[in-house]
Amino acid sequence: MEHRIPTSPQPCPETQTFWQAANEDKLMIQRCLDTGKAFFYPREHSPFSGRNHCEWFEASGKGVIYSYSVMTRATPAYCIAYVELEEGPIILTNIMTDDFNQIKIGQSVKVVFVASDNGQKVPVFTPEFH
């Protein structure tokens, strides 16, 4: 099956750490040091405390599908999804699979990194079948 090539991201200072790590096949997210809660998308200030008191850490890369939609009219077809990471944040991503009919809410997924149009790696997820 042909897979969709992700659109190239436009890194900015707040997201540079995230994109550099993606090129090394690492999923980096941030944690609020005041609350201990992890968050995503990358930003300078914690969404929990409003303070610039955060740290980067490598996420496990595991999660579950929270919600999804398969774009069957696109060429090639693709699946966009919200994935809830083990660490707590929910991220918008793509699910890479050869069988969209096997995708289910609550299904375990793991991160993989694919090259975008300009070569920048982008995190997407694949189903884990048990």
Image: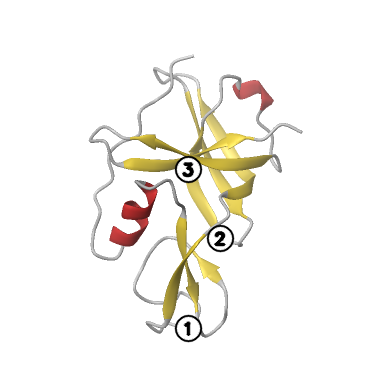
Determine whether 95 is above or below 12 in the image.
above
Q: Residue at x 67, y 35 (%)?
A: 128
Task: Residue 28: name its quadrant.
Answer: bottom left
Going from N to C along the chain, the mark reached first, 2 or 1, is 1
Secondary element under disc 2, as helix, strand or loop, is: loop
Q: Horizontal and vertical percent for residue 107? A: 70, 39
Q: CA distance from mark 3 to mark 1?
A: 26 Å
Type of amino acid under label 2: Pro
Q: CA distance from mark 2 to mark 1?
A: 16 Å
Q: Horizontal and vertical percent for residue 39? A: 50, 66
Point out which mark residue 28 bears. none
Q: Which residue is mark 2?
A: 89
57 and 30: which is toward the camera: 57
Q: Which residue is mark 1?
A: 49
121 and 83: which is toward the camera: 121
Q: CA distance from mark 3 to mark 2?
A: 12 Å
Q: Horizontal and vertical percent for residue 92? A: 48, 47
Q: Residue at x 23, y 35 (%)?
A: 118
Determine whether 11 is above or below 34 in the image.
above
Mark 2 crowdedness (10 Å alpha carbons): few <14, some 14-19, many ≥20: some
Question: In which quadrant will I find the C terminus?
Answer: top right
Mark 3 crowdedness (10 Å alpha carbons): few <14, some 14-19, many ≥20: some
Determine whether 48 is above or below 59 in the image.
below
Secondary element under disc 1, as helix, strand or loop, is: loop
Type of amino acid under label 1: Ser
Q: Which residue is mark 3?
A: 93
Mark 1 crowdedness (10 Å alpha carbons): few <14, some 14-19, many ≥20: few
Q: Horizontal and vertical percent for residue 85? A: 59, 54
